[in-house]
Image (cartoon, grey):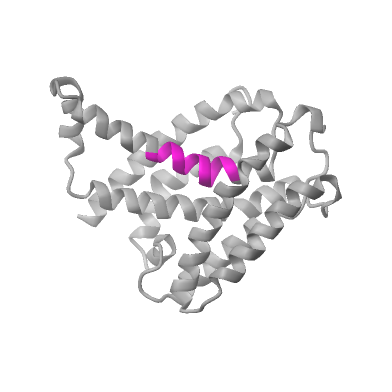
Amino acid sequence: MKALGLRLEDVALAGWNLAGVPLVAASALAPVLAFGGEPSAAAGTIQLLAVGGAIVAIATRPLGAPPPSALPSSEARLGFIAPLVGAITLVAGSASAHLEADFEGLVIGVAFIVTTAAMALGDRLPVLDAGLRRAFIFPFIAICAGIFNGFAADLLDDMDVGQLITAVTVDETGFGLFVIGMILAGLAAFYAMLVVAPRVLVTPEPWTGCLVWPARFVIYVVSAVLGIGWLAVLGG
């Protein structure tokens, strides 16, 4: 993994996409991976705790972080605030719906203040072990991945993926290629909002580390597509 610049959470997320999401979706904990829906105290509580973990990770800083000169600029990292707050809004809204409680606005406000303050305060934030911060953020990323994969599985439920792939080579109109391109674009947007954004803000990497993101994205796409295929089968 080190040779490829990958981290434990890259492999863990791939395994989660491939097997964890389908298994949870087929269990009594399936509402955890659903946006809102039927009231579920367990799902709402787990989602709310995941949001809390993300906020804790963002509001702290690790020991032994790379020097600021080796990290993306503050202006570059500021670009990830809005996507991350959007992701927190998604999960907080889902938790609020599951728990039938109107706390979504409060959680979103806290997330925005904490994220903005974390960017402004920098080395004055409380210190927390780097591995622990990464552990705090991972459940949030995993839940977001599950929500997205379930949504994508619903979209693909009535679509013959095999025929779609065949259409890429035999359909002169390019419709199959267009649809696959849209799916990949959706995955890329999701990956940037719900995986890259929290990880860049929680565990900044030197600029050289940015070169591994394409490899991480390929691993994510392959595992997500396979996992979505299992979800579609289970849903059928």
Q: Residue at x 77, y 27 (%)?
A: 70
Number of dots carrying numbers: 0
Looking at this view, name the residue that lies furthest to the front: 75
Towards the viewer: 107 or 47: 107
Q: Residue at x 19, y 33 (%)?
A: 164
Q: Residue at x 48, y 32 (%)?
A: 217
Q: Is residue 115 magenta?
A: no
Q: Residue at x 45, y 30 (%)?
A: 218
Q: Is residue 90 visible?
A: yes
Q: Quadrant of the N terminus?
A: top right
- Rendered position, 108 above or below 162: below
Give the magenta range: 186-197
Taking 188 as reference, is 139 left or right? right
Chief SS of the magenta region: helix
- Rendered position, 89 above or below 160: below
- Rendered position, 136 above or below 166: below
Taking 169 as reference, is 62 left or right? right
Image coordinates for residue 140, horizontal then vertical, percent: 55, 55
Image coordinates for residue 110, horizontal then vertical, percent: 66, 64
Image coordinates for residue 160, horizontal then vertical, percent: 16, 40
Q: Quadrant of the C terminus?
A: bottom left
Q: Is residue 12 visible?
A: no
Image coordinates for residue 15, horizontal then vertical, percent: 46, 43
